[in-house]
Amino acid sequence: MEGLTSVFFSLCVLFLFLLAGKLLRTKVRLFQRIFLPASILGGFIALAAGPYLLDLLPLFLFDTWSQIPGLLISVVFATLFLGVVIPGIRTMWSQGGSQLCFGMIAGSGQYFIAMLVTALLLIPLFDVPPIFATILEIGFAGGHGTAAGMHQVFSELGFPAGSALAQMSATVGIITAVAGGVFYINIAIRRGYCVNLDKRNGIPEYKKTGLIPEDKRFPSSSATVASESIEPLAFHFAITGLAILIGWVLLAGVRQLHPVLQGFPLFPLAMIGGMVVQLVSVPLGVSKYYDRQSFERILGFSLDVLVVAAIASIRLDLFIENLWPFLILMAAGIAWLFFCLVYLAPRMFPYNWLERGITEYGMQSGVTAMGLLLLRLVDPYYKTDTAQAFGFKQMLYEPFLGGGLVTATAPFILVSLGIWWSIWAAAGIMLIFWLISRFSGWTRSRPYKKAR
């Protein structure tokens, strides 16, 4: 099987594993309790059937799957700001400033903790390269697609195992997000930390199985153009393609700046392309035909396929070679994020700290979708202002961390500055945003954990 026929067949098999993952989520109580996504389960089934374990499938499937995440991550990032009304900086700051400060400390802290552990433990004990530290934030906040998109960067910098390790880091991150998040939400419900949930009004059963009953269903998109002229979903895919093409033009310019940037990835520039398309579309009157939910369906579809393919094609040989330094780094990253949730969030958010903190915890450990998943569990009807604050924060945060420009350039920066100067730089960023939060009146010394 060759060419496009091979690609099409590989995708069909991949969808089969996604369905298998959904079946497991529906039937197995443990997976329901920890809210493990079907894409994760399907990816592990496919990985088990691969060449490193059962060896049941032809190799060309895995060769195709390994290329999918690096392509689809550009689709995910291109849709982030399409169909979104981009407010002024003052509005974003007034409503999302405290969320941004917390997010910058949590995100920069992933680099700080990872580089510190790498410098003090992993380099002396396991002789890993300094850029080993970057796989934590790339995998946790960046996710599988970001990890795959960084493959060329790691190869250019002499660490070809980096992408595979970052993809496994992303897998650990999503499990940490859903399992750790749901675990803490249940504690928070019992202790009265949630605004909308208590012991009697816990998490609905249908959210655990993932099967929505008829009386709870809702439309997932709206038609803004007539299907007689163009299918509405095709129209939104075309707009997404335009954003990615703008990103490709920007990428050609970036790679001309310096030889070290030859491996710079496409996905953060595709995000900028999406912002450009959105901003230009407003004065032209085109943006009123953009349906945000349609872009979210494109994003969600791409993310599900991306995660299955990324996990299925993980290089287990490279992972096993770096097992112990990887486990130590993951443990340090998980401990840091729980510290942010349990200790910093009650002190840095003036109200709704649990809702705001758990959303950020989910995003920082398992990408934006996981943050919104946890938010929907504790605030299903968005009665608090968390969703809006988080959205404004993401507009300021995503262009830089969590798969943005800083994430894409972090390995280059670390190689250029050296690990200790990079540690001080990350610490400086954390301190700056702590002081901003403090002087803005958001941070207090004593936490008030009860819901208010």
Image: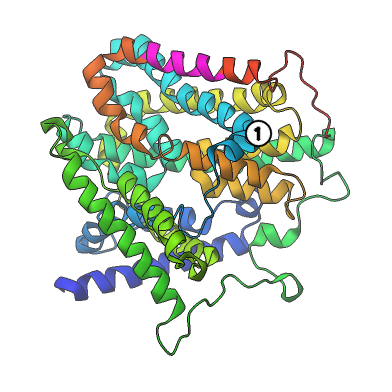
Q: Up-down: is 316 above or below 311?
A: above
In the orientation shown, which residue stands out farthest toward the right? 200
Q: Nearer the viewer, residue 87 or 248?
A: 87
Q: Up-down: is 260 above or below 16?
A: above
> Label 1, on which residue?
357
The percent position of residue 248, horizontal first and vertical second, equals 23, 52
In the orientation shown, which residue stands out farthest toward the bottom? 228
The percent position of residue 256, horizontal first and vertical second, equals 12, 38
Task: Count the numbered circles shown.
Answer: 1
At 34% from the left and 28% from the top, the residue drawn is 134
- Secondary structure at numbered mark 1: helix
> Label 1 sits on what residue type?
Gly
> Magenta stretch mostly in which secondary structure?
helix
Q: Which residues are magenta?
A: 423-433
Q: Nearer the viewer, residue 83 or 410?
A: 83
Give the position of the N terminus as an image quadrant: bottom left
